[in-house]
Amino acid sequence: DVKVTQSSRYLVKRTGEKVFLECVQDMDHENMFWYRQDPGLGLRLIYFSYDVKMKEKGDIPEGYSVSREKKERFSLILESASTNQTSMYLCASEFQGASNEKLFFGSGTQLSVL
Amino acid sequence: AQSVSQHNHHVILSEAASLELGCNYSYGGTVNLFWYVQYPGQHLQLLLKYFSGDPLVKGIKGFEAEFIKSKFSFNLRKPSVQWSDTAEYFCAVMHNTDKLIFGTGTRLQVFP
């Protein structure tokens, strides 16, 4: 079974802190995605990557950056966390060319920024 | 811009009731359509998908969805829900890019 692992299930940070959310997948997938999930807003795409050292902005990239130094790992970075970034963050991966036929999601990281 | 609308935000049903969750999208060209489900405390899972062919798609756990191109809709149905169907359901659309656009989700609560 494909496994997408997010390093933390719950995270509490203070305003202004730098936050790293880690995501690792074990199926050699090329494509990886970061979403945030908010009540009433569904899932919104923050950033995605189709290859190592490659990144593309999604629909709401402001306040975030990403890093893809290795194929299996895709990190989401909040340079200076703010309270409006309190959310559930979901990582996902798939094979390139799969056209989202099967997107595999991690269990999510619930981030609270105080 | 392409968008996905799920008009039912919260649905409450008794067991054995029939379910239909609405999903409408804004793009008129060729699209790929998906329903994802998120059970309490679990990760998002693919329920079913439509790429081409028969517009009536069967998914896991007795769910089905019908693609009606003229109505830009992809409604999710189940003839008889169970308590274990309590979850949040997301419709998603993909067109021309590798990005999925998700709807806002529908929370389904099924009472025994």
Image (cartoon, coloured by chain):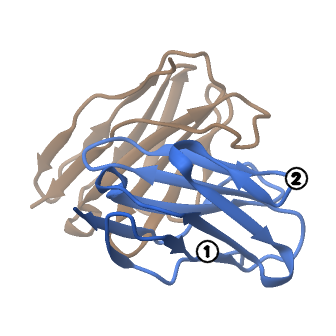
Chain colours: A brown, B blue
Q: Residue furthest front?
A: B16
Which numbered disc covers residue B52? Answer: 2
Q: Using residue B98 as the reference point, say whether residue A22 is left or right of it.
A: left
x%, y% of residue A13?
12, 50
x%, y% of residue A105?
47, 38
- Mark 2 → mark 1, Cα distance in angstroms: 17 Å
What is the crowding at mark 2: few (fewer than 14 residues within 10 Å), some, or many (at least 20)?
few
Q: Nearer the viewer, residue A103 or A24?
A: A103
Secondary structure type for disc 1: loop
Secondary structure type for disc 2: loop
Q: Residue at x 35, y 67 (%)?
A: B108
What is the crowding at mark 1: few (fewer than 14 residues within 10 Å), some, or many (at least 20)?
many
The picture quadrant where one finds residue A8 is top left
Chain-order first, disc 2 or disc 1: 1
The picture quadrant where one finds residue B89 is bottom left
Q: Taking A83 as reference, is A46 above or below it?
A: above
Q: Mark 1 = which residue?
A: B23
Please determine if labels 2 and 1 lie on a single subunit. yes
Q: Taking A113 as reference, is A75 above or below it?
A: above
